[in-house]
Amino acid sequence: MLQHSNEAPLSMVAVRPYSGPVTVGPDSVTEPPPESPHVGCRPVDLAPHRNNVGSTPASGTRNGAFNIWGNSFPAEELPPPGLCAVDQVVYDFPPTEPGTADNVRAAGQFVEVPAGRYDWLYVLGAAERRVEDELAFHFADGAVDFEQLRLSDFWAAPAWFGETQVRATRSMHYPFHVQAGVPAMLWSQRVPVTRRSVLSAVRLPRNPAVHLFAATLVLSGGEQR
């Protein structure tokens, strides 16, 4: 029988990259967010947990470390720091200053969240190859629920799990050059919060293929906004 604990085990679950044709659709990010975004949004503070440089300027690509090969997103093509909206869900996008960690590479981080009853955890991120792994929702009453987090590949790939395309860049950064015509993909995905209790924290999987730039919780329909 599978036993769960509060400590996330190290996972290397990843699926080989998609090798077929890639159809890049329109980006879905709004900057700044619309005047009437989803009023139940509660951005999660990921700043204390950022541990990876996932974007670089074209003038200095050597600091990139999104994957083991040192590839990175073009910082100039990502949303600017601050609030942006995807499908009316508001995210707080991190600064992308040269050499500064801008995303969370999942390593079992215990992320405290604004206490509340929620329907969804939305994440803005991408994976090194497409990934399915388990995160844990920790509730104020001591309950812990495990749910699947699914993220598609950042490397010129389609939305394997039906995510919303946030950005498809016009180039990919390598440590020593910029490769035009190879898009880096940024996705918006969601994970259900099914328990009707007050959520207090989220534990990320221990999977270095998972990268999160931002996260937002959406309140349950009956909660005060």
Image: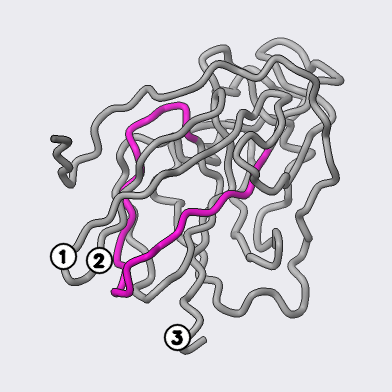
**Quadrant hosting residue 167:** top right
Circle 1 SS class: loop
Circle 2 SS class: strand
Q: In the figure, 90 relative to 149: above or below? A: below
In the image, 78 versus 162, the foreground residue is 162
Q: Position of residue 83 (x, y in %)?
A: 66, 63
From the viewer's perspective, tell me whether residue 210 is left or right of residue 26.
Answer: left
Circle 3 SS class: loop
Q: Please tell me how crowded label 2 is: few (under 14), some (14-19), or many (20+) other residues with Cα within 10 Å.
A: many
**Quadrant hosting residue 58:** top right
Residue that numbered label 3 is attached to: 223
> Between disc 2 and disc 3, whose residue precedes?
2
> Which amino acid lies under the numbered mark 3 shown in the image of this protein?
Glu
Region of the chain picked out in magenta, as a range: 186-210
Separation of residues labelled 2 and 3 (CA atoms): 16 Å
Q: Position of residue 203 (x, y in %)?
A: 31, 49
In the image, 225 versus 13, the foreground residue is 13
Q: Please tell me how crowded label 1 is: few (under 14), some (14-19), or many (20+) other residues with Cα within 10 Å.
A: few
Residue that numbered label 1 is attached to: 142
Could you say which disc has been placed on residue 139 in the image?
2
